Amino acid sequence: MLFASWDFMSPPKSRGWLTEIGVATSRPAAFAIFLVYGIAWITVGNGLEWHSFATLATWGMTLVIQRAEHRDTQAIHAKLDELLKVAGREHVMKVDDEDAEEVESRREEIRRTG
């Protein structure tokens, strides 16, 4: 894996909160914060200049994309969980609780042995 050697850059403590930030940006509260910040920026700042508009539009679209990706991922996981339950492989469902780096190392291990 190309970035496997970069694990030293993300200490174990930061991995959990980085994931939590990603999940938090997909929540409706993130949109509320965005709206309040945008209104404050336009009101207190220089108004709605092209740079301000471009920055706010980029940030807003990022939140929309994050929300759609999170919804799709949760739907896929719900379907997979149901299939794993029916197949009697509930222990595999616990992979969702691991950090991304742990999942990657588990996948590499499965590829080597299988």
Image: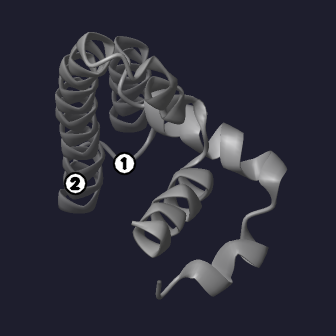
Q: Quadrant of residue 7?
A: bottom right
- Residue at the spot x=21%, y=37% of the render? 69
Side of 7 where 29 appears, left or right: left
Closer to us: 8 or 42: 8
- Residue at the spot x=82%, y=47% of the render? 13
- Residue at the spot x=54%, y=66% of the render? 109
In the image, is residue 14 above or below residue 74?
below
Q: Secondary structure at mark 1?
A: loop
Mark 1 residue crowding within 10 angstroms, few (<14) / some (14–19) / many (20+) = few
How far separated are the C-alphas under marks 1 and 2? 7 Å
Colour pattern: one colour
Side of 39 where 102 appears, left or right: right
Query: In the rendering, at what x and y percent does residue 50 appear?
Result: 18, 59
Do the numbered discs 1 and 2 sit on residues whose CB atoms are within 8 Å? yes
- Residue at the spot x=59%, y=58% of the render? 101
Query: In the rendering, at what x and y percent does residue 97 appear?
Result: 57, 29
Closer to us: 86 or 80: 86
In this figure, which residue is indicated by the disc labeled 1? 46
Q: Secondary structure at mark 2?
A: loop
Closer to us: 93 or 9: 93
In this figure, which residue is indicated by the disc labeled 2? 49
Side of 46 where 13 appears, left or right: right
In the image, is residue 104 above or below residue 63?
below
Closer to us: 92 or 69: 92
Q: Amino acid at mark 1?
A: Asn
Query: In the rendering, at what x and y percent does residue 33 appear?
Result: 44, 21
Mark 2 residue crowding within 10 angstroms, few (<14) / some (14–19) / many (20+) = few
Q: Amino acid at mark 2?
A: Glu
